Image (cartoon, rainbow, N blue to C red):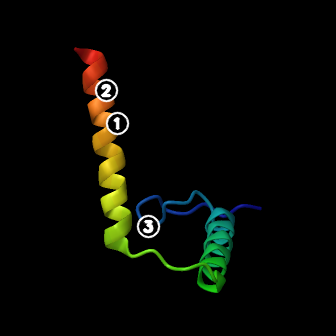
Amino acid sequence: MTTPLDPIVSEFATVEEAEAYDKWFREKVRRSMADTRPRIPHDQVMAEMEEIILAAERRHKSRAT
């Protein structure tokens, strides 16, 4: 049986959905913390993403003209 949750209090429709999400999320965090690959600084990721976005905008703009 599924127990409905109040949508004002929870983003999940049922307790079961909330528990399944919690289990998934905790496993994702556990795996991330156990990952031995080198960390990438936030500023580096943001700079790389900014360049990707700017390149896409330039391509889009060149096709529009």
Tag 3 near tag 2, CB within 8 Å: no
Name the residue tied to disc 3. Answer: 9
Name the residue tied to disc 2. Answer: 60
What is the distance, in whole Å, between disc 3 and disc 2 at their CAs? 42 Å
Residue situated in front as seen by the camera: 10 or 1: 10
Q: Secondary structure at mark 1?
A: helix
Q: Secondary structure at mark 2?
A: helix
Query: Mark 1 is on which residue type?
Result: Ala
Q: Quadrant of the C terminus?
A: top left
Q: Secondary structure at mark 3?
A: loop
Tag 2 near tag 1, CB within 8 Å: yes
Q: Position of residue 50 (x, y in %)?
A: 30, 53
Query: Mark 2 is on which residue type?
Result: His
Q: Position of residue 8 (x, y in %)?
A: 40, 61
On the rendered structure, is 15 left or right of 63?
A: right
Which numbered dot is residue 10?
A: none
Tag 3 near tag 1, CB within 8 Å: no
Question: Which residue is at 66% across, 78% downward?
Answer: 31
On the rendered structure, is 6 left or right of 41?
A: right
Q: Is residue 26 positioned above or below 60 on the image?
A: below
